[in-house]
């Protein structure tokens, strides 16, 4: 996993991010010229265990059925 964020500084001074970028399960790359090397590093040094922990912590409720729940909710309000 790799996070290419050329607009990171603008985003952080405006809206911000609700978690620390250091917690993301992958390298954060701002400069395009560093992207190629970062992709190679990510491929060689990826921490699958940390990714699973991150997904469980931040995306644990994502089960692939959100659209179905929204449709049921909307249909129930008619």
Image (cartoon, grey):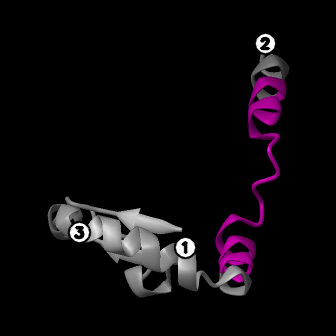
Q: Please tell me whether the stretch drawn in magenta is mainly helix, strand or loop.
A: helix
Q: Secondary structure at mark 3?
A: loop
Report whether residue 18 is seen. no
The answer to whether 78 is drawn above or below residue 21 in the figure is above
Residue found at x 67% / y 85%: 50
The answer to whether 56 is drawn above or below residue 23 in the figure is above
In x, y percent, where is residue 26? 49, 77
In x, y percent, where is residue 31? 18, 67
> For the magenta stretch, what is the residue range?
51-72
In the displayed structure image, the side of residue 63 where residue 47 appears, left or right: left
Q: Nearer the viewer, residue 69 or 11?
A: 11
Q: Secondary structure at mark 1?
A: helix
In x, y percent, where is residue 46? 59, 81
Viewer-nearest of labels 1 and 3?
Answer: 1
Residue found at x 21% / y 60%: 6
In x, y percent, where is residue 24? 50, 78
Residue found at x 30% / y 71%: 29
- Residue to which mark 3 is pinned: 30
- Residue to which mark 2 is pinned: 78
- Residue to which mark 1 is pinned: 43
Q: Check residue 31 in the rendering and tell me which mark sits there, or answer none.
A: none
């Amino acid at each position: 996993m790799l996070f290419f964020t050329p607009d990171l500084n603008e985003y952080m001074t405006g809206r911000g991010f609700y978690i620390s970028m250091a917690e993301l399960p992958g390298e954060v790359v701002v400069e395009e010229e560093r992207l190629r090397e970062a992709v190679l590093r990510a491929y060689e040094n990826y921490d699958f265990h940390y990714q699973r922990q991150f997904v469980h912590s931040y995306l644990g409720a994502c089960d692939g059925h959100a659209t179905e729940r929204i449709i049921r909710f909307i249909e129930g309000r008619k």
